[in-house]
Image (tube, rainbow, N blue to C red):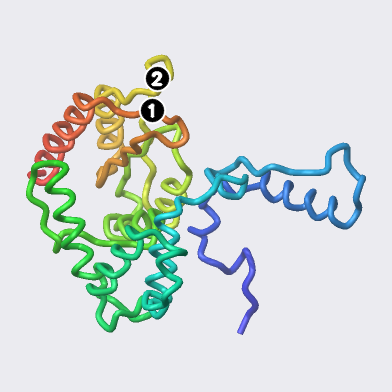
């Protein structure tokens, strides 16, 4: 069996450009190794990685409640220890018990439903309904271990060939463009308006949608990052409504084509 090399791997992987961990980061890691092996070899003695939102690596403390609940769920036997109430908050203990009661076997190491634990999805659906005043079905909710797996899952679901396009904002978090390339789809960029605080203009969506269609590309999904990453803007409610109306209109048009 031939060895694996850049010439033999999936060419779609080579098309992925993930700048968050690209050439600059690779160089930074090499310099960091030099600083360890040869102290004083450079005019600096520390490297700060600001290529990704990773605040805890720079000293930000985690939210205590989440960590306490996780600890109690992963090691439930300590819930019955006399010292637990002095080490953990009452809220964390209560929440951990509620979560464990919904997990078959009360064990976080067990396989769960592919959509996520049903009891947790019920709770999330109730929370969405209370927040938005709109019915939410737990059977329509899929829980993932972070945003990245969810993005990859959706790209795998939607992209059939290079003729399928995904509209993504520019500037964007490169996870999206990389996952589109990995699945063999086409990135359809739409540009945020820097002069308007990185706002999203529906006219820009219409322009890029029409341009993609003229090239024989079928837009399959619209990526909206809100709050913006890396731009940080928050879309106004009326702007969000415009985007939903645009998707509804174009989605209906596409399904009839």
Q: Measuring 39% from the left and 43% from the top, which residue is drawn there?
A: 187
The reply to whether residue 116 is in sight is no
Task: State yes or no: discs 1 and 2 in contact (Cβ < 8 Å).
Answer: yes
Which quadrant would the N terminus be assigned to in this image?
A: bottom right
Indicate the quadrant where residue 204 lies: top left
Q: Is residue 228 left or right of residue 254?
A: right
Indicate the position of residue 21 as horizontal and vertical percent values. Answer: 60, 50
Residue bearing the label numbered 1: 233
Quarter residue 73 falls in: bottom left
Front residue (pair 233, 216): 233
Using residue 54 as the reference point, say whether residue 246 is left or right of it: left
Q: Give the residue at x 45% y 50%.
A: 63
- SS class, disc 2: loop
**Residue at the disc numbered 2:** 197
Badge 2: residue crowd in 10 Å (few <14, some 14–19, many ≥20)? few
Q: Residue at x 55, y 67 (%)?
A: 9
For marks 1 and 2 on the same chain, the one whose residue lies earlier in the sequence: 2
Q: Is residue 130 above or below residue 85?
A: above
Image location (x, y in percent) of residue 257: 11, 44
Give above or below for 98 relative to 151. Answer: below
- Out of 70 and 132, give the one closest to the viewer: 70
Q: Relative to residue 202, is residue 74 depicted above or below?
A: below
């Amino acid at each position: 069996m031939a060895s694996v090399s850049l010439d033999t791997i999936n060419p779609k992987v080579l098309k992925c450009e993930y700048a968050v961990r690209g050439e600059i980061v690779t160089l930074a890691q090499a310099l960091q190794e030099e600083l360890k092996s040869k102290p004083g070899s450079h005019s600096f003695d520390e490297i700060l990685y600001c290529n990704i939102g990773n605040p805890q690596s720079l000293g930000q403390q985690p939210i205590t409640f989440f960590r306490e609940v996780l600890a109690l769920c992963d090691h439930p036997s300590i819930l019955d220890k006399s010292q637990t109430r002095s080490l953990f908050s009452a809220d964390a203990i209560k929440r951990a018990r509620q979560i464990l009661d919904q997990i078959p076997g009360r064990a976080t190491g067990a396989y769960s439903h592919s959509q996520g634990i049903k009891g947790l999805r019920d709770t999330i659906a109730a929370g969405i309904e209370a927040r938005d005043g709109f019915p939410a079905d737990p059977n329509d909710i899929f829980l993932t271990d972070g945003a990245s797996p969810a993005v990859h899952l959706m790209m795998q679901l939607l992209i059939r060939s290079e003729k399928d396009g995904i509209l993504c904002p520019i500037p964007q978090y490169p996870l999206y463009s990389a996952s589109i390339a990995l699945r063999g789809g086409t990135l359809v960029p739409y540009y945020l308006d820097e002069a308007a605080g990185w706002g999203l203009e529906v006219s820009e969506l219409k322009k890029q949608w029409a341009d993609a269609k003229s090239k024989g590309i079928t837009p399959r999904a619209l990526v909206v990052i809100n709050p913006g990453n890396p731009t940080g803007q928050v879309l106004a409610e009326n702007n969000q409504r415009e985007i939903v109306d645009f998707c509804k209109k174009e989605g209906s048009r596409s399904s009839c084509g």
